[in-house]
Every structure is written in structure tokens, then in C-alpha cells.
Amino acid sequence: MPSKSKEEVVQEFRVQSIQEATMRVIARKGMAAATMQEIAEEAGVAKGTIYLYFRDRDELVEKTFERAMGLLMEQVDEALDRETGIEEKIRSVMSAQLAFFSANREFFRLYLSLRMPEGSPQQQRRQKRTCQPQYRSHVQKLADVLSTAMERDEIRRVDPYRLALFIIEGSTAVILERLGEETSPDERADMEFITTLILDGIRKGSKS
Amino acid sequence: MPSKSKEEVVQEFRVQSIQEATMRVIARKGMAAATMQEIAEEAGVAKGTIYLYFRDRDELVEKTFERAMGLLMEQVDEALDRETGIEEKIRSVMSAQLAFFSANREFFRLYLSLRMPEGSPQQQRRQKRTCQPQYRSHVQKLADVLSTAMERDEIRRVDPYRLALFIIEGSTAVILERLGEETSPDERADMEFITTLILDGIRKGSKS
DNA sequence: TGCTTCACTGACCGCTCGTTCAGCGATCTG
DNA sequence: CAGATCGCTGAACGAGCGGTCAGTGAAGCA
């Protein structure tokens, strides 16, 4: 007997297609202007149907974010496990992030929207509880890698969390710029730019 | 005779106090949740009064953003004129940004909200037309400084606009983190962190 | 085939928010 | 001092939202 009944499979499918529609609509209109009506139309269901699978709008957005963030984290973890040196690790994390955002532009806006909670204090509290921790643990993952490299004296000792923040937000800005351009330079070129910048800075005379 | 009549002075004062109230409310509640009612209460006027000075909510937000952005640009320009070397210029721009955002936390949220247009396509087009150019010219200003330094061989030659983006967004992330902490390290320490990171990177063995 | 079930629908409700405008009182004018 | 002027007010309005639920019809069952 299969581990999932037919009903469960159908349910799973509905949940997934509603979440994908949510990402597309938020990508098009932004977080605040994405209405339940439009999400329902995008998913090809009635507005009421969404409420069979999600308690309310907040839960829909929250679960959608968690799902996408989970996918990104998987990619990053894989990239970190694959490489050994700090240079390769940084480069591969950046690449994973760029690839993921290019393939999921929809998610990118969701990601940016949720870093900055909006709405009533109550909504803010809820977003802080659920979405920010995921973002923080994303940053923390890179911070841990950097911290390890510092202990091994591969890189200079600085506040690892701040360094991770700087790297992630800086590279996010470059990725955002890329997505806005009609023709961007080669993906590898931008990754090289970021990695070199972080590792060697820009002062003339730094080695390599 | 004075260049401004009494009525003009009163009008100027009203406009300014409404804009300041707008910044405070957006800082407290976020862009989407800042209502005209609350802005009016904060400014100590009736809701209708705001419409005597601004066509609609969009214009209010837009003008408020322009005003604050203008103040920030003034600070940055001043910092750039004051210093000569590239290292000092970068450090002073970062300091100006940090000081401005610390003193105007309200504006910081407005700044973050407007980088990411939301709302109907029409609203988005409008924000793109007015707010994004200001942000871009902010970035461009730093890019020009970096570009000049590259011509003088003070720093390595890379895409100056991307570099400026990386620096500004990276440092913004650190500033955001600072504002969220109860007790942050010394302001100078964080500025030194950013400047050193950019100029020398983090690889062990880079000079200085 | 008639009955039951239930996932799904979309018209509807209550509410909030941006926007308007008739009216009010302070100030000016002759 | 009467009348005109005008900046300002806030109750009222309409649009549009999230959320609800009585109704529908296809599928399963007897």
C-alpha cells in the first residue's frame, strides 16, 4: 500500500499550486498588493478554496515563504558540503544564491518583502516569529563557515555575523541589479567579482 | 520686503510638519500600514488638511521621500568634498550614512520600503519614475568616486557601479543590524570594519 | 437510480482606508 | 459691526479588501 492515499496526493497538489500562484502574484504586484482574489485566479481556484488549505492570508504567505526558503537552504547546504576551502565555499554559496534567484524570480520579491516586516504590530510580531528566524539562520549558516575559517587562520578575525550580513546583502544587491538588466555579464564574472572583492578587497597592491 | 510672505511661511511650516509626521508614522508602522488618519493625528491636523497640501497619499509619500533623500545627499556630498583620499572618502560616506540613519530612523524604513516598489502597476511606474532615480543617483555618486580612484590606480579596476551597490547595500545591512541591537559596538568600530573589509578584504596575508 | 457526501464555489458581509465637501469659526475689510 | 473670505475640520462616502457560508454538482454507495 502506498504511503500516501489518493486524497493526500490531491491535497498536496492543491497546496503546492496555490503556493506557486502566491509566489507569482507577489512577484508581479508586491506583497501588499497581492490580493486573495488574484492569487485564487492565478491558481485557477475560487477564493474560498484557499481557505480550505490555509487558515488566513498570513498563514498562506508564511507557509509559502517557509517552503521556498527551505529549497534555497537545501541548495546552500549542498554547495557548502561539496566544497572544502573557504574561497570555494564562498564562491559556491554565491553561485547557489544567484542560480536560485534567477530560477525563482518570484520568490526573490517575497524574500525581500519579508525581511522588512510591514503591517499592524500584530502582523509584525508574527512575521518576526516565523520569517525572520529563517533569514537569520540563513545568514548564520554563512557566519559559521566564516567563523571556522577564522579559527583556522584562513581569514582575518572579525565579527562573523556582520561579515556574513555584509556579504549576503551586498551580493543580493548585485543579483537584483542583474535581474533588472536586459543583458547581464556572464554569471561567473559576477561571482568572481564578489568573491575576489570579499577575499582580497580592492586596494591596489593586495596580493593576488 | 521679505522674500516670503507670512502665508508662505505658514504654508512651508505645515508642509514640513506633515512630512515629518509621515516619516515618524511610516517608521512605526511600515509603509503599507501608515494611514492618513494616523499621519494626520501625528501632525496634529485633520485628515482633510493634508489634502490641502498634497494631492493624494502617493504624492505625500513621494515628496517626503524626496525631501529626506535630499538631506542625506547633502550630508554625503559634504563628506565627499571634505576628504581627499579614497580611503577617507569611503569611510566618511559610510559615517555620514550611519549618522543620518541613526538620527532619522524613521527615514530608514521609508528608504527601505521605497527601494522595492509595491502596489498597482500604475503606482509602481510612478515610484520607479520618482524614487528609484534618486536611489540610483545616490549609488552613482559613490560609483563616480570609485571610478576616479580606479583611474588614479589607487584601487583595482572593476565595474564601479556594481562595487558601489555592493558597498552601499552591504553597509546598509550592517546599519540595519545595529539599529536592531540593544547595545551596538562603537560606531567607529563598525565603520572601520566596513572600510577595511572593502579596501583589504579578509584573506590572511593581505597587507595592512 | 435515488440518496449521501463533500470538495468546491462565488455572492455576500463587515470593515478599513483614501478621498471629498458642506459647514464652521477666525480674520480681514469697508 | 456686518459681511466676505478662507484655512481648516471631520462626518460621510465609495471602493476594495479579507474572510464566510449556503448552495451546487460530481462521485461514491446501496
Image: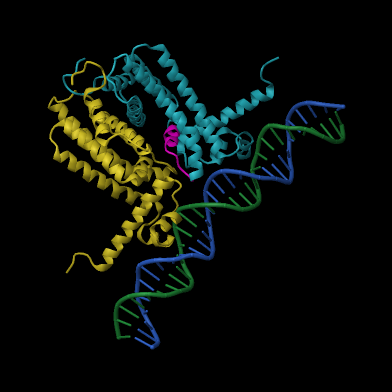
Chain colours: A yellow, B cyan, C blue, D green
The residues colored magenta run B109-120
* Residue A107 x, y percent position in the rendering: 34, 46
Q: Is residue B160 above or below residue B122?
A: above
Camera-side residue of A28 and A127: A28
User: Where is residue B1, by image quadrant?
Assistant: top right
Q: Is residue B53 above or below residue A9?
A: above
* Residue A153 x, y percent position in the rendering: 13, 24
Say whether residue C19 is left or right of residue C2.
right
Q: Is residue A186 above or below residue C30?
A: below
* Residue B201 x, y percent position in the rendering: 23, 23
Q: Is residue B159 above or below residue B28?
A: above
User: Where is residue A54, by image quadrant?
Assistant: bottom left
User: Where is residue B95, by image quadrant?
Assistant: top left
- Can residue A189 be found in the magenta stretch? no
Residue beneath the point at 15% across and 40% down: A81
Camera-side residue of A121 and A172: A172
Quarter of the picture holding the C terminus of chain B: top left
Say whether residue A150 is left or right of residue A163.
left
Say whether residue B5 is left or right of residue A176.
right
* Residue A87 x, y percent position in the rendering: 17, 30
Q: Would residue B25 be visible to someone looking at this image?
A: no
Residue beneath the point at 29% across and 29% down: A166
Residue beneath the point at 51% across and 38% down: B126
Q: How many numbered markers are drawn? A: 0
- Can residue B117 be found in the magenta stretch? yes
Camera-side residue of B156 and A96: B156
Q: Would residue B72 be visible to someone looking at this image?
A: yes
